[in-house]
Image (cartoon, grey):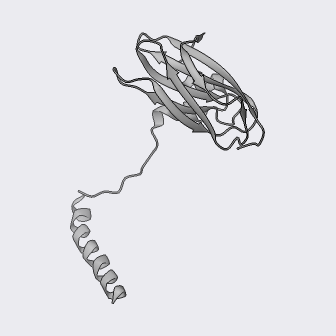
């Protein structure tokens, strides 16, 4: 009974979609990642990732709060909290310097949004992570945190 029902449903679905395919209203398209960030997320160094995102200069600040454990027992799952006290923060970026692909996250915020995020990242070894805040006036700020990893995650 189930086999008959399934074949009927399969046939009726094809019969409904066939006219749409013939008229060109239903065309399969490829699902692609956004190409405008591909260079940044595929960069193999932090400098190349910053360059792909057009971030030339960074000034270190204490207004970016980067909460992460000093010692991570398992590098496969490290919780990192990022928040910014800088006025008009538009985006936060998270880099893990020694990872094969250092850019871990880019988070964009609206005009009245609170710039806060909690992200889980993988770390291949002990390293420095950096959070970059971009403000509406075009300035870029950075904060650093060193994390010791006891068990590699990558």
Residue 95: quarter of image:
top right
Residue at x 31%, y 57% (from the top left corner): 27
96 or 10: nearer the viewer: 96
Q: Position of residue 54 (x, y in %)?
A: 52, 19
Q: Quarter holding the C terminus?
A: top right
Residue 104: quarter of image:
top right
Q: How many marks?
A: 0
18 or 144: nearer the viewer: 144
| 11 left or right of 133 in image | left
Q: Quarter holding the N terminus?
A: bottom left
Residue at x 51%, y 19% (from the top left corner): 133
125 or 64: nearer the viewer: 64
| 89 left or right of 98 in image | left
Q: Position of residue 101 (x, y in %)?
A: 64, 35
| 140 left or right of 148 in image | left
Q: Position of residue 120 (x, y in %)?
A: 58, 38
| 150 left or right of 130 in image | right
Residue at x 50%, y 24% (from the top left corner): 92
Residue at x 28%, y 73% (from the top left corner): 14
Q: Which residue reaches farthest right?
A: 150
Q: Which residue reaches farthest bottom?
A: 1
Q: Position of residue 9 (x, y in %)?
A: 29, 78
């Amino acid at each position: 009974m189930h086999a008959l029902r399934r074949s009927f449903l399969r046939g009726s679905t094809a019969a409904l979609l066939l006219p749409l395919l013939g008229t060109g209203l239903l065309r399969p398209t490829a699902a692609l990642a956004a190409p405008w960030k591909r260079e940044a997320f595929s960069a193999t160094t932090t400098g190349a990732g910053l360059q792909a995102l057009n971030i030339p200069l960074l000034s270190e600040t204490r207004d970016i709060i980067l909460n992460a454990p000093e010692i991570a027992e398992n590098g496969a799952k490290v919780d990192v909290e990022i928040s910014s006290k800088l006025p008009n923060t538009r985006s936060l970026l998270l880099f893990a310097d020694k990872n094969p692909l250092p850019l871990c996250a880019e988070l964009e915020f609206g005009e009245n949004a609170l710039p806060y995020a909690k992200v889980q990242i993988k770390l291949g070894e002990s390293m420095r992570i950096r959070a970059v805040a971009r403000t509406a006036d075009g300035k870029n700020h950075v904060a650093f945190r060193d994390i010791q990893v006891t068990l590699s995650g990558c």
